[in-house]
Image: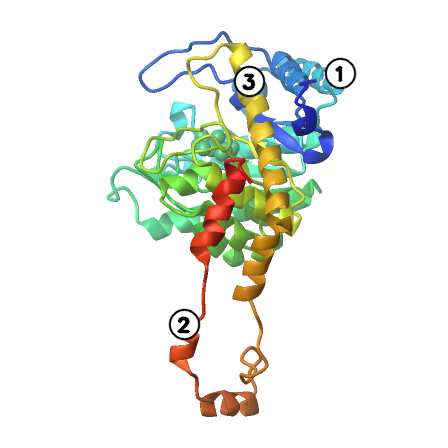
Amino acid sequence: MAKNGKYEPRPEHKFTFGMWTVGSLGRDPFGDAVREPLSPPERVDLLGEVGAWGVNFHDNDLVPIDATPAERDQIVRDFKKACERNHIVVPMATVNLFFHPVFRDGAFTANDPEVRAYALQKTMRAMDLGAELGAKVFVLWAGRDGVETDGCRRADVAVQRARDAINYLCEYNADKKYGFKLALEAKPNEPRSDIYFPTTGHYLALIPTLDHPEMVGVNPEVAHERMAGLNFMHGVAQAWDAGKLFHIDLNDQEPGRFDQDLRFGSNNPKSAFWLVKFLEEVGYEGARHFDAHAYRTEDYEGVKDFARGCMRTYLILKEKAEQWNADKEIRQILKQIEAETDAIPPAIKYSREAAAALLGYSFDKAAIAKKRLPYERLDQITIDILLGVR
Ligand code: GCO
Ligand code: MN
Ligand code: MN
């Protein structure tokens, strides 16, 4: 196990990695693999060595798309053994609906009904596999469900097809008594020019229109919301408020770039800080899943550095959040800016009388506008804490 002192990962931190993350060969659209492939058990060994709690996989990270049933069973047996010897659990499973050319026009929203049916079949089999390995969350990221030209289908037809597919999979989940929480993962673009349901907010709006809204939540990813130029923590907070934060994909990303999948907190540690602070304060109990890749310049020692770095940064930021909350000056400022007053009529719960009182009240706007809001100081203390000088 990694010796990180007080920032050493422990099982209760629930740190997980995708098989595809530490198993990434470093391919990109311009360059071929820079690392030799590791078998699934070797990837689990690597995660055991760095001190992760869990591993997640796409169906085909584990079982090749054309494997025979006998091959599948052998692979699953070897994988289970590797998980047991490393004390690694499988909290989440997912399905690859983007790699094979059959999905070049999408999966659930493709125009060809045969592709849509195949996507359902492949997803049901991936759910079988996930359930067999003990996963409780099933992520759906339909990364090819999008367009280059909107001439190919009306966008509301795509929404209806996605809804039909999710409804179908919820029935399968219920029928098989798998008890999966389905977590929908949004991304604005890449690999398609535009992907349907581009942000977590779009999925949050779809969920109440499903047949089984209680089974379905979201899996927001830092990089995806930042590609869309959004404040990630705000989207996470809205998902949390809706009771829909079923999973989370942690990594980092500079807005306006290709999908970078950087080590958690490495690009914008301040945003990562607000996120960790939020997750810890509200008591999010799901996995802290890192969906990121080591730099293409690294070998597998570097991949371990990358994985350790993701967890270490999370734990450092968690400690910084505690320091922030305990800081006397910060507490003083928060008390000042959140101060309640009895002087005004109650303005939360509506009643005819309360509304009449509010309508009749006269506000001293000039005095209100002069109240101090020392946000510059508040933010500089935050920076001092983050930069380690406070
Ligand atoms: C990406 C996505 C994927 C998904 C994964 C789970 O940008 O490639 O984030 O890594 O999270 O496919 O379904
Ligand atoms: Mn991603
Ligand atoms: Mn992801």
Q: Point out the image quarter for the N terminus.
A: top right
Residue 298 numbered mark, or none: none
What's the CA distance linking mark 1 and mark 2?
A: 63 Å
Q: Is residue 34 above or below residue 184?
A: above
- Image-based side of 151 in relation to 105, left or right: left
For label 1, the SS is helix
Label 1, residues with CA under 10 Å away: few <14, some 14-19, many ≥20? few
The residue that label 3 is drawn on is: 305
Q: Out of 89 and 307, give the one closest to the viewer.
A: 307
For label 2, the SS is helix
Q: Out of 147 and 223, give the one closest to the viewer.
A: 223
Question: How far from the left and from the top, in percent, is residue 316?
Answer: 60, 34
What's the CA distance linking mark 3 and mark 2?
A: 50 Å
For label 3, the SS is helix
What's the CA distance linking mark 3 and mark 1?
A: 22 Å
- Image-based side of 151 in relation to 176, left or right: left
Label 3, residues with CA under 10 Å away: few <14, some 14-19, many ≥20? some
